[in-house]
Image (spheres, grey):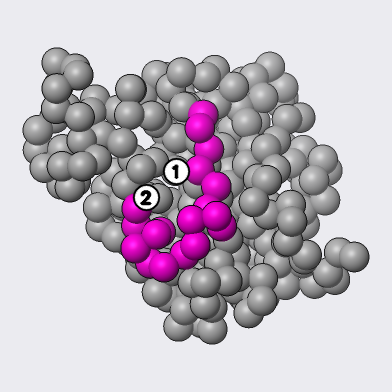
């Protein structure tokens, strides 16, 4: 099983984080490591894939917090694992609770303040991004005791500017600086740059932000809703504060 371990968190003591890949060909159905709550996989396949993830990473499934995402900006503060409804962000201060976001072209934005022991995970597709899920998430982390200057961030692989063709009505939701109106037949949006701008505006230091350069549409290692439509599985971005800090 292949997963990405964000470089930005490797330097931190007491943080576990990973981003799963599609891992096509594995799983009891051979369709890969689909970890989506609302994809075409069965509950049996989902449970098997989650168990495989747990076996490979050591993450306790009883302490894994997932959310039925709705492309909005609601955020839940959680203290235990489980499935939470109708939100797109999770925040925790509880050690060993792994908070997770499902994506397949949208970005999973994982944030940790290791000093004040606050972690957040946010689902940032274009709707969530323009609704302010990321700055709202930072603000709510601050309300839970975090400090933007102490935050470290991973923005996962997601759709790139080159592949994010949109209609005029969507492009108008973004500041012009994040839209390319001239290079293509239709407008294209730079979702990664927009999210990074929001993080910098929230006063998180630039050298504490890692943005994946991978495009989910271009790279078959990832699931992509734009490429695969209803057949696309979901990847997970996971972050957890460790109860026992690593030495």
Secondary structure state at the residue bearing disc 1: strand
Is mark 1 in CB contact (under 8 Å) with mark 2? yes
Q: Nearer the viewer, residue 41 or 117?
A: 117
* Residue 170 x, y percent position in the rendering: 16, 39
| Quadrant of the snapshot with the N terminus | top right
Q: In the drawing, does residue 113 fall left or right of residue 1?
A: left
Q: In the drawing, does residue 56 fall left or right of residue 63?
A: right
* Residue 161 x, y percent position in the rendering: 32, 29
Relative to 149, does residue 106 appear above or below in the rendering?
A: above
Q: Earlier in the sequence, mark 1 or mark 2?
A: 1
Among the 4 quarters of the image, the one containing residue 30: top right
User: Which residue shows up at 39% across the image and 41% down it?
Assistant: 192
Relative to 152, does residue 54 appear above or below in the rendering?
A: above
Magenta span covers which residues?
197-214
- Does 153 lie within the magenta span? no
Secondary structure state at the residue bearing disc 2: helix
* Residue 31 x, y percent position in the rendering: 62, 20
Relative to 195, does residue 162 appear above or below in the rendering?
A: above
| Quadrant of the snapshot with the C terminus | bottom right
> How much space separates mark 1 and mark 2, taking CA atoms?
9 Å
User: Which residue shows up at 38% across the image and 29% down it?
Assistant: 160
- Residue identifier under label 2: 195
* Residue 112 x, y percent position in the rendering: 60, 65
| Residue 107, numbered label | 1
Image mark count: 2
Q: In the drawing, does residue 64 fall left or right of residue 135?
A: right
User: Which residue shows up at 55% across the image and 26% down it?
Assistant: 222
Q: In the drawing, does residue 101 fall left or right of residue 131?
A: right
Q: Is residue 141 visible?
A: yes
Furthest residue in direction right, as rendered: 247
Among the 4 quarters of the image, the one containing residue 9: bottom right
Q: Nearer the viewer, residue 111 or 225?
A: 111
């Amino acid at each position: 099983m292949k997963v990405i371990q964000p470089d930005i968190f490797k330097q931190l003591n007491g943080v576990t984080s990973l981003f799963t890949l599609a891992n096509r060909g594995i799983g009891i159905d051979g369709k890969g490591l689909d970890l989506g709550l609302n994809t075409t996989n069965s509950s049996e396949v989902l449970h098997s894939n989650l168990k495989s993830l747990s076996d490979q990473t050591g993450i306790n499934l009883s302490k894994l917090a997932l959310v039925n995402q709705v492309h909005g900006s609601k955020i839940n503060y959680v203290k235990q694992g489980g499935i939470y409804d109708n939100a797109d962000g999770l925040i925790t201060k509880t050690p060993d609770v792994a908070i997770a976001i499902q994506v397949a072209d949208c970005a999973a934005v994982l944030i940790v303040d290791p000093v004040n022991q606050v972690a957040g995970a946010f689902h940032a597709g274009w709707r969530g991004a323009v609704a302010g899920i990321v700055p709202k998430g930072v603000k709510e982390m601050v309300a839970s005791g975090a400090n933007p200057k102490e935050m470290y961030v991973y923005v996962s692989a997601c759709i790139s500017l080159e592949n994010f063709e949109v209609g005029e009505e969507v492009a108008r939701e973004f500041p012009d600086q994040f839209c390319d109106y001239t290079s293509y037949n239709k407008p294209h949006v730079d979702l990664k740059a927009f999210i990074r701008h929001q993080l910098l505006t929230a006063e998180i230091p630039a050298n504490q932000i890692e943005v994946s350069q991978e495009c989910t549409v271009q790279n078959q290692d990832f699931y992509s809703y734009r490429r695969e439509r209803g057949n696309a599985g979901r990847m997970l971005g996971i972050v957890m504060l460790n109860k026992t800090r690593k030495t």
